[in-house]
Amino acid sequence: MNLLFFSPHKNERENMRLSTSLLFIFFLSSYLIAQTSKSPKLVVGIVVDQMRYDYLEKFYNDFDEGGFKKLINNGTNFTNCKINYVPTVTGAGHASIYTGTVPYFHGIIANDWIDKKSYEGINCVTAISPANKMFIEGISKSQSPEQLLSTTIGDQLKLNNFGKSKVVSISIKDRGAILPAGKGADAAFWYDDETGKFISSFYYMNKLPQWMTDFNNSGIVNSYLEKEWNLYKSGNAYEDLPEDNSPYETDVFNEGKTSFPHTLKNVSEAEKYSKMTYTPWGNQILIDLAKEVLKNERLGLGKYTDHLAISFSTPDKIGHAYGIQSYEVKDTYLRLDKQIADLFKMLDQQVGEGNYLLFLTADHGGMENTQHLIDMKHDAGVLENTNFYENLTDFLESKYGSSEIIKSSFSRNLYLDYEILDKLNLTRSEVQETIKEYILSNVSEITEVFTRNELETMSASRNTNNYILNGFNKQRSGDILYSLKTFYLNNEKKLGTQHGSRHIYDNHIPLIFYGSTVPSEIRNEEVYIEDIAATVCDFLGITQPSDCIGIPLLKK
């Protein structure tokens, strides 16, 4: 194919200029195409635990330029991202973000659930095959990603190139680190509340890398124990909030008040490492650690795309303690804004601006404090305060002659005792239907009820047609599952906030993608938490996670 055309009617110098111009255009076009199709050197996933979408807009004017505003103004901001299952909790959220599917498939139905054989509690990162090894400092023998039934973004990266990509996940919470890491990661590190050090699992390694041991021994965590938590900005930045010393807040630090400033002076020595994570320094130590991970693991500097997952757990802890309308929550986000700006600087310095793809999202939102809602004349309350379980047990005893038909209840799941049913010659389907009819007829706080028999005939999907179905798993869920009406909790939470429902305050989360080829735009179509993994994998040109039901949201 001829790219250059010479006219016999022009002199040699004119033809040379034309040739040079066309060659320049050709090579420039080739370069731009290559840049556009080039995979990023690093994928960075940021999950902010308990971040409601409206925080981006509510706090926008008080953010600086380099953090949240940089993401909002220079990335693709999906303003209507929803969680389409219940319960909206940390374990299920992190699993759904990184697997691109719902609990129905990935199996993380809650932070904890009941084993249907032993009726004992299981945590979402409980090891199925605990390590039978001598104790090694910094290595957990009881936590692993084995409860996760689907692959993750990081797993797919590893599978795509025979493990040549590096995948590292960090968090304050174990589940915030382990579930994003998946099964093929190089490492998952989380914070140990008892020692103030970061640890990992036998599943990933037999001993901590030397750089992590050095970080743990550096004294940086101890330095935060002495810091006073004052307001980050002037009082004008908080004037839209109610009083600082609110009656709806927890006195986390035993100060006799809930207003600023806060210190750990009155906290016992045994609790200081734990209570420090209820301050913005909990986010800061993750930023400190991220710097060490980037440097020592050389993320984004190799031939293949690497992955760094960061989960900021501290906003969830502070939200639970102080509530969504508190000075503490807003101050945490104003400081997190600066911390994310610092992370950008690290990434630009090591990987290079334009060489990484980053997304920011959340695992769930949070509800207003129940008593505050009642004081504001809203219908709000707590199911356990209505004697729901006692009344249901009394009904079943009067109908079937036994008070032990329900073996256990957990996270809006009721588990039947199959041995008792067999002894009474009762079928499971009959008892399930009886309980469902009783609840719908007698318990106004519950709006939806599904039985196991019903749910086992259905399949989950990428929509909001059935939140309970999407959060159900055949092997792990109970026999009767239910949802509560707006502003109702399952269990008492007098101070601060709680979450877990299908309602907008719990399921509307931020989602922003940022990168050199990601357009700067605002999009308000409804998208879902499962679309994150689908989008990242499509952007990288790799296979989506094993049970992914999300769809790609960006055009490359």
Image (cartoon, helix red, strand yellow):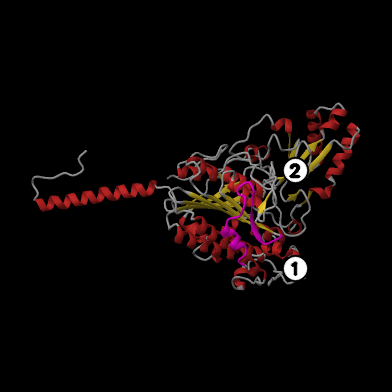
Instruction: Give residue 13's position: percent from left, percent from top.
Output: 11, 53
Q: Badge 2: how crowded within 10 Å, few (<14), some, or many (20+)?
A: many
Q: Regarding mark 1 in the picture, which secondary structure is present there?
A: loop
- Residue 554 painted magenta: no
Asked if residue 203 lies in the magenta stretch, the reply is yes
Give residue 267's mark: 1
| Residue 531 quadrant | top right
Quadrant of the drawing holding the C terminus: top left
Numbered mark located on residue 412 in the image: 2
- Residue under the image location 83 percent in, 48 percent down: 386
Q: Nearer the viewer, residue 512 or 150?
A: 150
The three-letter code of the residue at mark 1 reads: Val
Q: Who comes first in sequence, dot 2 or dot 1?
A: 1
Q: Report x, y in % for residue 220.
A: 61, 67
Q: State the extent of the magenta-drawn residues as a range.
A: 194-218
Amino acid of disc 2: Arg
**Residue 98 visible from this viewpoint:** yes
Q: Is residue 411 left or right of residue 181?
A: right
Residue 73 percent across, percent down from the top left? 47, 58
